[in-house]
Image: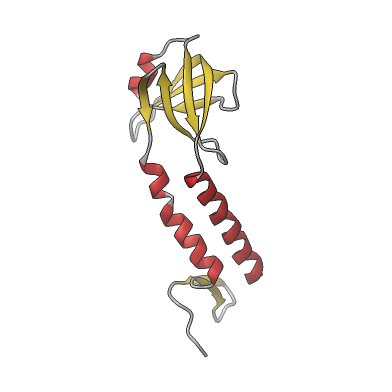
Amino acid sequence: MDVLTRLAALLIAILLAIDAFSGERTETLRVAGHTRAPRWHQDDDYRLHFLGGRVESCGFGLAAWNALHDGEGVAVDTSRVFKTCDGLRRGDEVLARRNLHKWLLLLPIAMLLAAALGWIRFEGDVRHERRARFGLRSRR
């Protein structure tokens, strides 16, 4: 099972790296609607719904939500693998842009690569439960 876990970690790390560092895909879409989902523990979720492409909806925040009207044409920048929304433009006007999340993916990519290379490994204890051990493997 250890080999399967390491292969899965490697595959997920590769997909995350491709998603984070490959070029963005830009689609021209039409705004089909607006939704607002209130949340009591943090800011409300403002989503724009689109027609005419592979992205159905994106959450960009209140400023972009208020700036666009139904039927307007916009350019939406998305990642290639997981289709996350990275930017929103109307003509030459940039309404929203997310740059930081791609750099934040470096941490899970590094953790998954470390697991795939065996630097983080799973070993059984007395009760044969699986637990993670962090650090470099000891040489025996």
Residue 133, given in percent of the width and then of the height, sits at 47, 73
- Left or right relative to 87: residue 19: right
Count of all numbered marks drawn on residues in the image: 0
Residue 16: horizontal and vertical position, in percent? 52, 50
Residue at screen point 37% across, 27% down: 96
Q: Is residue 92 above or below residue 115?
A: above
Eyeballing the image, is 136 above or below 98?
below
Residue 121 pos. (x, y %) = 53, 72
Q: Position of residue 91 (x, y in %)?
A: 41, 16
Q: Quadrant of residue 46?
A: top left
* Image quarter (top left, top right, bottom left or bottom right) of the N terminus: bottom right
Please, is residue 139 above or below residue 11 in the view?
A: below
Which residue is more in the foreground, 39 or 50? 50
Q: Residue at x 49, y 73 (%)?
A: 119
Left or right, 83 with reference to 4: left
- Render colour scheme: secondary structure
Q: Residue at x 56, y 38 (%)?
A: 80
Asked whether the viewer can see residue 44, the reply is no
Q: Determine the residue positioned at 40% across, 14% down.
A: 68
Is residue 36 at least partly visible in the picture? yes
Q: Is residue 61 left or right of residue 12?
A: left
24 up-or-down from 10: above or below: above
